[in-house]
Structure formats: structure tokens, C-alpha cells
Amino acid sequence: MTCRPDLRFFWLVGAAASLSAAAAAVPADDPVAKAVQALERRDGIAAEVAGKQALDRGTPRSEVAALIGEGELLQGDLGDAREWLGPGEFSPATRERGFHALGRLEMEEGNLSAAAQAFDRALEGSGGSAELWVDIGRFRYSAGQHHLAVEAAARAVAIGPEDPRALEFQAQLARDAQGVRAALPFFERALEKAPNDIGLLGEYAATLGEAGRHRDMLRVARRMVELDPRHPRGYFLQAVLAARAGRDDLARRLLDRTDGTYDEDASGLLLSGVIELRTGNPALAVERFDELARRQPDNVSAQLLLGRALLADGEANEVVGRFKAAADRPDASPYLLALVGRAYEQMDRRQEAAGYLDRAARAGTTAIEVLPSGEEWGAAGAATAVTVLRQALEQGQAAEARSLAAQLAADYPDSIDVEILVGDVALLTGDPASALASYGRAASVRRDFSLVERMAAAQQRLGHQGEAVALVARYLEQNPRSIPAAAGLGRMLAQRGDWRRARLLLGHATALAGGDAGLLADLADAELAVGDEAAATRAARRAYSLQRANGRIAATLARVLEVGGSEREARSLLAKADGLSASPALAAR
């Protein structure tokens, strides 16, 4: 999961043992000390009560404003928190704490400039605590200052090498830059110091799941329920795990135990929609995905899931109405093309369906997406910059495009989104070495598969085929549940004639993806190449049952049947494939 700011994780507690020791050291009649202790265990209500007791006993407001304000912040009472934190009137002893809390408040309300000022003031006169540098790092990441965020994380770990919050942040950054498996040791170190921290346990469990360690994920999620049976995340994580295992009824029961906590949450809408879709309730799935798409209009996956649910609900006209314009763009994704093609197929407009499905088959094995839309990256002015760059490149103005990209890099020196954009321009203007350098800098912070694809393409254009394969293999090793990585590596190996390993990887990708017709056709090619005709026939027939108007898939099934001796059926399918403009991809010839 990409490291994005989530203020719920900022304020979680340290080890329970240290808190009990602190409790013994706090004088019973010292409300200020009680407030500090309450904040250390992240009990906002107790901190507020103790702080106001101190105020009633004559303690100056400047001595308790930071304590009460942070207590209100922990409770989610942002308006009350601002009353105490907003004036910035803190005693010298509470100054760092007060401006730190004010910075978090400004982040919560989306006031990035004010948050930066508050964090700067928190650092005045001191080097800052590990937790302060963690929050500064999260702030910088949210503001698109990615390399500065990494520096802040390193500073936090240097100040507090055993601080659970610093180690958690380091784990999240490692997950982004190196992969889910690389993050696990950092989470484990943090949990050695805070073994009962529900937030840390939740992050650790989710990362275990992405690493394919499902039994360990279940063990940790159950531990969360033991620690706090009322906390919903332990049940939610178990619901995710049950859904991944195809146990949708169990997933639904576990989701019900969250008492509606995730009903309005994006992750909850996603999980609920998937469960409804798979259990034969497409209308309910449409409701969930439609709400998710409204909340996150730039979330491409949410839009495509909505389209899939609409198609399952028999609303092919709605699918075409919503998605045809996007599918007609030259950079449309294979999934989107297949979705619109299947909608036309459902409407019995097979010739129109064939055009989209054939484009999906070609795009699925050859295309990488560069120059993303401006909404997909964080630097200011993104949409305008991408539009101008596209226009310059379409008009053959390579020098102008490179000049604009260089100016963006100068304006946003710490943004990995800009580094990727600069790399895209270099790749598209015939300079793969420079593209690889830009991509490499971005990958030191966030190495998702779309970036790995770009890096592999640059290596291939430099003639380094082996390094391109190695890049994808390293990514898959760290992220074993990545469908595009497993499929991409399988296809690369197939093109190199390594059908044995290609078969294993394509089988793994198919198992993760479920009913992906293109992947099943690729798997059929690989099964046939290694001599397993029965397995090839099963995969090819399943692919054809999913997309009958796809010429390439019809050709794959025809080829498999011909090898198996079913020549009459094979000839009929080949004639159909010819009429649909088949474009075979992995066929061993």
C-alpha cells in the first residue's frame, strides 16, 4: 500500500509496561502530570479532564493549552482543539508539544501552508523529537516533497532508533520503495517495543497479507481482537483474508462485526462491493462501487469495478454510456477495452465488441502507460503540465517537451511524480538512459509496478533484455501477490522461450486474478508449449467462455484444439478468429 497520510496512525500508544511504570511515578495531586501521562497513552478524554482540573486550580492557561488541545485532537474534536492550539500561546516547557499538535490539526483540516509553519515553530530552539519528525515526514510526503519525507524519516530513526512511530514510518516507506517483504522487519522491531499497539499490529497484519503470509496475518488479526474485542480493524482484516480465500459468507459475517465502522470508508465499500458481486448481488455491488467512485472520482480501479458490476447486473448500455469515450482514447487500458467490448457483446453487437476486445488483446502484452493524467500525481499544476507535454510530443516538438520537463524538475526538485514525468519525456524522445536515471531516483522512494514497467522498457530499449527481466523478477519477489508483475514476467519469459517458468508464473497470475480471459489464453499457450494438452484445453475453453468475440482468444482455442485432434472445431474457430482480426500473443510457433 502506498504510504499516504493517515492521522489515525500518528497518535497510537507505546508499550503498556512503560505506561504502568509512569503511572506509579505520577503524584496523585498533580493534574498537569496526569494530563501528560494520559497523552502518552493517547487517552484524549483523560488528558482534557486533567488539564482543565489544573486550570481550575490556577495553573496558567499557557501551561495547559497544549495538553488540553492535544487531548481534544485525539478525540477528533477539531473545533475545540483549535480554541486551545490556534492562538499558539504555550509555555516554554510545552511549546514543542503545542506547535506539534497544531501542525497535526492543520494537516487534518488540509491547511498545508499553516501546517508547515506550525511544524517549523515546533522545531525552534530544539532538534525535535522522533514523533515530531515522523509527522513532519508524513506532512512532506502529502505535500509532494517525497525525498524530503525520506530524510525526515531517517532523522526520526536517528533520534529515536527504538521509537515505535519512527520504525512504523520507516516500515511504510520501505514498503513503498522496496516491497512488502522488506517492510516486515521494521514492523517487527517496532512491535518489540510496543507489542500491544493495535495500530502497529494492524499495519503489520495487512503487510503480512500482501506478502502472502496469510496464516501469520490471521494470527496477528486475532491477537488484535484479544487485546480489544471492540476494536473493528481486527475483524476487518480477517474479513479481507476470508474474501481472498473465496469464503465470502465468512467475510460478510466478519465485516458485520465491525458494527458499521467501515460502511462509509473506501476500503469497506471496496470489500463490501466485491463480496456482493461474487455472491450474486450485482445491484448491491453497483451501489457500493458507485458510492466509492463518487468519493474518489480519480480512482480508476473503483470506476472499473463499477463497470464490472454494471455489466454483471445486465446494464450494458450504462457501461457503454459511461466508459466508451475513455475506451476510444489511444491510451485506454486493456481492462477498460475488455469491459466495453464485453458490454457490446452483451448487447449482441459483436462486430463492435470485436474491435475493443482485439485492441485489449494487443494492449495487454505490449503497452505501458506513460505521461499519466495530471490527477494521478501530486505536484501543483500537474494537469496543465501533462496536457502541454502531450501536445508538444504529438506535434513532434521533442526539444520543447524536454525543456518543459527540465523546468518542472527545477520547480519541484523533491517530487518523485515530477521525476517520473521527466523520465517519461526522455523515454518518448529517444533517451532511455536519461529516462532510467529519472525513474531510478523516483524508485528510491516509491517503486510501484507501473514504474518498474517503465524501467524495464528503458532497459529493453538500451538492449539490456536480461536486466529488464531481472527488474520485474525482483519486484515480484518482494510483492508476490502482484498480478501485473506475475503476468508481465511470465510473458517476458515466454517471449524468451522459457516456457516452463512462464507457465508457473502465468498460472500464479491467473489464480490471483480469477476470470481474466487474456491471462487464461496466455496460460493456455504456455501449457501447450510444455506439452500439457489437457491443461491447455481447459484454460483455452475457459478464456473463450469469457470472451467469445475476442479474435485472439478464439485463435488460441483453435490452435489448442488442432493439436488435440479436434480439427473440425479448430477450423471453425480459426475462421471466426480471422473474421475478428485475431492477434496472437504468446503462441509458440
Image (cartoon, rainbow, N blue to C red):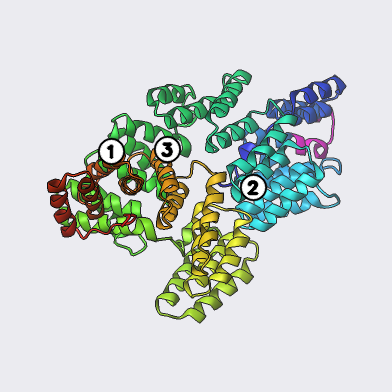
Up/down of 274 relative to 224, above or below: below
Quadrant housing residue 113: bottom right
Q: Which residue is mark 1?
A: 534
Residue 308 location in percent, x, y?
Answer: 31, 43
Q: Is residue 60 magenta?
A: yes
Report the span colored magenta: 55-67
- Decide if residue 570 is in sight here: yes
| 92 horizontally vs 508: left or right | right
Mark 1 element type:
helix
Left or right? Give the position of 125 relative to 410.
Answer: right
Circle number at residue 173: 2
Q: Is residue 262 left or right of residue 575?
A: right
Disc 2 marks a residue whose amino acid type is Leu
> Dot 3 corresponds to which residue?
270
For residue 79, say whether it is visible: no
Pinpoint residue 370: horizontal percent, then vertical percent. Answer: 46, 63
Residue type marked 3: Leu
